[in-house]
Amino acid sequence: MEGSFDERLKIAIPAKGRLREPAIELLEEAGLGPEEPGERALAFPCRNAPVEVLLVRAADIPEYVQDGVVDCGITGADLVRERGAEVSELLALGFGGCTLQAAVPQESRVTSLGGLDGMRIATVFPRLARELLEEQGIAVQIVDVTGSVEVTPRLGLADAIVDLVSSGNTLRTNGLRSLGSLFSSQAVLVGGAEPDAAALHLARVLKSVVNARDTRYLMMNAPESALDLLTRLVPAGRAPTVLPLAEPGMVAVHALVPAADVWRLLPELEAAGASSILLVPVERLLG
């Protein structure tokens, strides 16, 4: 890991659930070399840096960071807001994406979020659900549950639910339909209200990995006569590097391109005269 720390940095990640493995993978890609944690491990060191990883409940991470138990943590943005902890969001990590949605039984007459006014809403996010609905002028009675939220309307405990949704399959399986999204969430790196230099440094290192995941390094050969057209096709942001080739009238063009644009870009480059096109992953991307 670039740079150094005066003291060992402690970072908390979820002990289980959908964010655990992606969080460990992110640390690995950042060059920290986390030791492979055993099934019962509560903490493990990183081989390449003075960083200790603690495995805790995802919902507890915002408060651990707030209280200074750890220097920073990886958890869901939904949990950060639900807990109301005084922490700073250092970096959105690009995985664990989901939305907090309101849903009603298929047979319900409610067709919009506004129709929930005055109803009983079951959720494991009582603080966040109330805040988000009140922001839209919708007053509800919150039914705070800790188990499966989807079954509460069928049991007569609530008229609707507010819960995290990834694909929507769980809603459909339980005879529910969405009324719309209230909040978009993903995994985030959080630090204290005034994060120290070590936490900020870690955020910069992780950001280089997150940025690289969405980027590809493009290399291609082309006639000099096609250079203007090819550079216009490459997405704006960073000017491509142009190098002369041994073959007269030919150049090599290197550029960073968004991974999401590759499917559209390749046939356009070929049509413009590019050849020997090569796309490779980017390990780190700074700046």
Image (cartoon, rainbow, N blue to C red):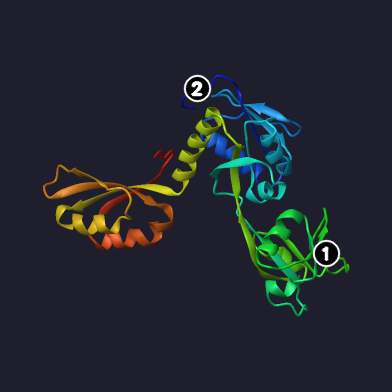
One can see residue 125 in this view = no
- Of the two numbered discs 1 and 2 on the same chain, state the one appearing first in sequence: 2
**Residue furthest to the left:** 248
Name which residue lies at 50% across and 31% down: 201
Query: Which residue corresponds to the image point at 87% horizontal and 66% vertical from the top-left?
Result: 157
Q: Rounded to the nearest whole Å, what is the CA distance between mark 1 and mark 2?
A: 51 Å
| Residue 152 percent coordinates (x, y) | 84, 64
Q: What residue did someone put label 2 on? A: 4
The spot of residue 173 in percent (x, y) is 75, 67
Which residue is depicted at the point 64% across and 65% down?
A: 181
Q: Nearer the viewer, residue 164 or 214?
A: 164
Report the amino acid beneath label 2.
Answer: Ser
Q: Is residue 20 above or below residue 114?
A: above
Q: Look at mark 1 in the image and give the residue it sits on.
A: 151
Q: Residues within 10 Å of mark 2 (few under 14, many from 20)?
A: few
**How many badges with numbers are in the image?**
2
Does residue 280 appear in this view?
A: yes
In front of the other: 180 or 283: 180
Give the label, 1 or 2, closer to the camera. Answer: 2
